[in-house]
Image: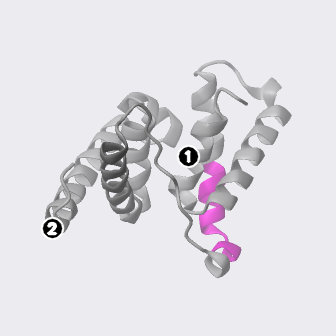
Amino acid sequence: MQEYGTRILHLAFFYLKDRQLAEDVTQEVFLKAYQSMDEFRGESAVYTWLYRIAVNLCRDRLRSPWWRRIFLPGELPVVRGGEAPDEAALEAVRNQEILRHVLSLPLPYREIVMFYYYEDLSTSEIAQITGLPENTVKTRLHRARKQLKEILSREGVTA
């Protein structure tokens, strides 16, 4: 849990945009993984299996009528170490702006961007996690980049 907990929390936050709900889903991921440990066939990496559980739980939450009634956006702090305070503050503001725009993307694009840039996964790993063909992942990544570039240039944010 220590090895993947933070990464799963960030993944859940990207989907749900609420820290408390993301924490709940993170706990649920590890509970489900523990309960179905003997079903894990080892055909993929453990993190891919855990991410797949997390993606499914997040998608379930987003589809539920309960979700539509109580959605309240949260915040994800961006933390950087080893920088001068002024540089760190500017970098944090810039990252928050970029993150805000990433979170505004439609879910199919947002999830691909999150996996590729924030989790540093390959397109084939993303395809495994999402259950999409790899070419679909590449297409969504291309379209998401295009949308982000347009949004960021309109807003005057340099990436």
59 w.r.t. 141: above or below: below
For image coordinates 40% across by 54% down, the residue present is 110
Q: How was the colour assigned to the protein in this rendering? A: one colour
Q: Badge 1: few (under 14), some or many (20 or more) residues near its Cα, within 10 Å?
A: many
Closer-to-camera residue (42/80): 80
Percent across and percent down for residue 13 are 56, 54
For the N terminus, the quadrant is: top right
Quarter of the image where one finds residue 32 = top right
Percent across and percent down for residue 125 are 45, 29
The magenta span reads: 56-67
Give the residue type that dot 2 points to.
Arg
Is residue 133 found inside the magenta-colored segment of the image?
Answer: no
Provide the major secondary structure of the magenta segment. Answer: helix
Percent across and percent down for residue 25 are 70, 52
Question: Is 118 left, or right, of 35 in this rendering?
Answer: left
Question: Is 151 left, or right, of 39 in this rendering?
Answer: left
Is residue 58 found inside the magenta-colored segment of the image?
Answer: yes
Closer-to-camera residue (137/156): 156
For image coordinates 59% across by 51% down, the residue present is 12
Residue beneath disc 2: 154
For image coordinates 65% across by 34% down, the residue present is 50
- Disc 2 element: helix
Question: Is 67 left, or right, of 146 in this rendering?
Answer: right
- Farthest residue to the top: give it: 42
Q: CA distance from mark 2 to mark 1?
A: 27 Å
Percent across and percent down for residue 114 are 42, 45
Residue beneath disc 1: 10
Instruction: Point out the tag, 2 or 1, that comes first from the N-terminus.
Output: 1
Give the residue type that dot 1 points to.
His
